[in-house]
Image: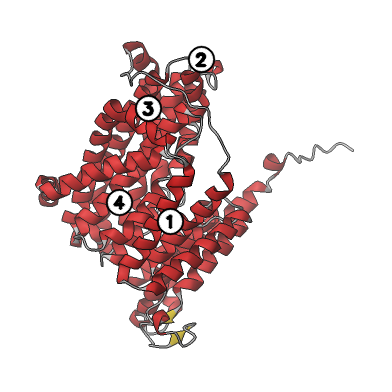
Amino acid sequence: MDAFLNGLLSLGDPYLLLLLVAATLGGVVIGALPGLNATTGAALLLPFTLTMEPVPAIATMTAIYCSATFAGAITAILINTPGTAASATTCLDGYPLAQRGEAGRALGMAVVASTVGGIFSVICLMLASPLLARAAYNFSPPEYFALTIFGLSMLATIGEGSPLKNLIAGGFGIFLALVGVDNLTTVERFTFGSYELYDGIGFVPVMIGVFGISELLVQSSRLNVRHERITMKSVMLPSREDYRKTWRAILRSSGIGTFIGILPAEGATVASMIGYNEAKRWSRSPEEFGKGAIEGVAGSEAANNAATGGAMVPTLALGIPGSATAAVILAGLMVHGLRPGPAMFTEQADFAYAIFWSMMLVNILFFFAGLRGAKLFARVTLIPVQVLWPCVFVFSIVGAYALDQSMFDVWVALISGVVGYFMRRYGFSVVPLAIGLILGGMLEQRLGQSLIMLDEKWWLMLTRPLTLFFLVLTAIVLIGPPLWSRRPWRTGKFHTGEG
């Protein structure tokens, strides 16, 4: 209870409040710009948070995460182009509503559903924290090692590419994590005599490169794309009839989004798709979906914003990012010397609750920002990409250099950007690479600690119930889907006994 109240009292800091307001407004702008998203915004912001205290730094990044996820609905509804991937399903009914002259109604529903979904997920996060705190006492290095292995098994499904390509990208990220001096043996690995590589490859320049600069290179091939823009008079709160139609869809999608967000390797995009499909499944008029159903907007937006709070559960409690943006936030936690994992809710409970309350406040802030400022924020879509992306590039370079005032970090960011561009071009997702880089170092450290603890007898890890549980779960995750897809009822190849 003390941590709960201390987290709430942290919002009384004027400096933190100012940062949250600024980050919320900035996140709405980022989410409303086609091509930019919460992950890119958090990656670009990361180096500038290093001079802050941990609570303001991580709270600012989560504010970008929550508000940018909501703001993707603005362009999805007005120009049929989702500002973020999580708003892709919002286009299906939001844009037809806008074409009928009901853009304000659609955006009003998006604001309300997003706020309800976000607040619902944060409440679930707060309620789950005491349970996670109790679990902390059962974790030691072998359990953390097995948990990290389980997190790495999610690399196959976390990206947009095929499972094989995702695993290859994740393996490359783990390889990058091995560069530098091993902390346990002091042996240099893959440094090639370079002093700059002695401490390894930093998270921040790589994040800036693979999420920011690579996106710049991708967008450079779309300079001539033009979108039809629909104007609106104002954002309107949903009518009583709209609430009557959508309240079940909003609550259902809030639960779905929170659950999907908690699952490592899923995230807001998957949540919005499932939320939209379930809204259609349970609707009394499913034939209206895709033609301007207000339930479709509600189901999609409640789910994708609920996933932001859900994704923070494995990120903070297990050290496993629940989404691409959560991976960047996890990098921020580690850069600030924080230990994500079950022990966070006992050793750093005040910090955890401060983040929870900050996310709660951000969801309230973007409710008012969306109602009062959506028309203004929609105008940022008029910024020419020829102006926008050079600014993003400059911001990326400054961010990479500001980390340690090192040109080496700038080169790492540039090279990472080029690598990320070619990965995307040939169907490889950059998200597994980033997560592999983060978890690779954790995996090596926890393996070393486990071997020291067990006197080099690694097989003793299999005698520990929690360790064995996570290892078995990993095997199921890796082996289960291929076997399931080959079952007769999945392939349609049944043997009837007839010749």
Query: What's the CA distance linking mark 1 and mark 3?
Result: 31 Å
Three-letter code, disc 4: Met
Q: Earlier in the sequence, mark 1 or mark 4?
A: 4
The residue that label 1 is drawn on is: 393
Residue at (39% x, 20% y) in the render: 232
- The image position of residue 105, as x and y in percent, is 38, 18
Colour style of the rendered protein structure: secondary structure
Query: What's the CA distance linking mark 1 and mark 4?
Result: 20 Å
- The image position of residue 354, as x and y in percent, is 18, 50
Mark 3 falls on what kind of element?
A: helix
Residue at (32% x, 46% y) in the render: 64
The residue that label 4 is drawn on is: 61
The residue that label 2 is drawn on is: 285
The residue that label 3 is drawn on is: 110
Three-letter code, disc 2: Ser
The crowding category of the residue bearing disc 2, from other C-alpha atoms within 10 Å (few below 14, some 14 to 19, many at least 20), is few
Residues 290 and 217: in front is 217
- The image position of residue 289, as x and y in percent, is 53, 21
Three-letter code, disc 3: Ala
